[in-house]
Amino acid sequence: MVSNLGLVALIFRTRSLQQPMYLLFCNMSINDAFGATIIIPHVLRDILMSHSGRYIHYFCCVIQAFCVHFHASASHTVLMIMAFDRYVAICNPLRYATIMTNTMVVKLSVTAWAVAFVMVAILVGLSVRLSRCRQVIFNLFCDNASLFSLSCESLLINHIYGLGYTVVLLGSSMSSVTLTYLKIAAVCLRSKNKVLNSRALQTCATHLAVYILLLVAGFIIVILHRFPQLSDHRKVASVLGHVALPALNAIIYGLQIKEPIDNRVETARNNVKENGGQLPVLFVLAEAMEDDGDHPTEKHDHIQAQMSAAGLQGFIIQRHALTS
């Protein structure tokens, strides 16, 4: 949780990382921190308590089940919008700045969270409507299966929606990610620029690694559900899926974010060497600063911000300051 929140803080505090790709990373990091917060405290409490003290109120169980499925669903929807970002960046690089604006990033993020919220709300709501005739949950934490297993009513509607929910979520994420990377691969094969292909592969490898880990963890849990005799293995796999996976995601994203920071430092060092140990100076004509009617001080701050975002180190000297 700390590592994921640290990545979010780093992205928002570093101007050079405030780009669509890294801002979308924040969605995944926040979701991973959210998922770890749901599971870890509850599991640790039960481990330290005796068997007779391991209980949870039904309302709290419903909230936990909703959060568990919301975390899993949001992981898929967020990775889908991240795949769209990589598709635009590699297949339509000239239109990337026009398409992936801050407004578009906000719209994609809100859509990813909203779709996951609605789907999970219906899923859990169908289980809450059932009457209860049991009180024991055979799982380390509450999920939708734990909720409807407490009922003695017909579960036909729950099974139908649960199957449709799984098919729609996994089908849409797998198809969108597969089609996206097939198109990206086709573009890279047609391109003869090895540098661009290497950068494309490097940026996509992070996203693809996280998605494969998510799919493998999900499929293992689903398969183990079909074998009641392996219930203990399923419990361990479920906890690892909600605890180990967010930690691995933080490491993978951290390595991805580390590169632009290292490049920025290396650029600054090279600029210092090329200027004989002095920071580079950017000369700005006074006329250029007054073209759009901005106050010189405001234009100065704007250009200085652009330099910082581009990884340039230095200061601005106006021409009228040199000739006065």
Image: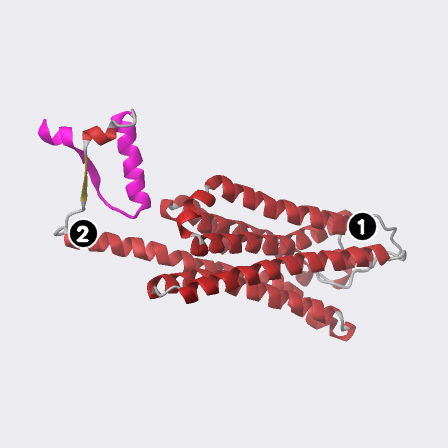
Please say whether residue 323 is one of the residues in the magenta stretch. Answer: yes
Identity of the amino acid at label 2? Val
Judge by depth and name the residue closer to the eye, 306 or 279: 306
Indicate whether 285 appears above or below 206. Answer: above
Residue 159 makes an appearance in the image: yes
As drawn, which residue projects farthest toward the left?
Answer: 323
Please say whether residue 297 is one of the residues in the magenta stretch. Answer: yes
Query: Rounded to the nearest whole Å, what is the CA distance between mark 2 and mark 1?
Result: 64 Å
Query: How far across and down, in percent of the image, does residue 124 sit?
Result: 76, 50
Residue shown at 85%/58% (left/top)?
Answer: 156
How many marks overall?
Answer: 2
Q: In which quarter of the image is the C terminus?
A: top left
State the SS at label 1: helix
Query: How far across and down, in percent of the image, does residue 97 sit?
Result: 41, 45
Residue 53 makes an appearance in the image: no
The part of the chain drawn in magenta is 295-324
- Which residue matches tag 1? 126
- Earlier-in-chain disc, 2 versus 1: 1
State the SS at label 2: helix
Query: How far across and down, in percent of the image, does residue 190 sit?
Result: 41, 65
Judge the density around disc 1: few (<14), some (14-19), many (≥20) Cα neighbours within 10 Å.
some
Residue shown at 31%/39% (left/top)?
Answer: 305
- Which residue matches tag 2? 272
Judge by depth and name the residue closer to the eye, 251 or 91: 91
Figure quadrant of residue 246: bottom right
Along the horizontal axis of the image, is 63 left or right of 134? Answer: left
Q: Give the overall secondary structure of the magenta segment.
A: helix
Residue shown at 56%/63% (left/top)?
Answer: 178
Indicate whether 155 appears above or below 189. Answer: above
Identity of the amino acid at label 1? Leu
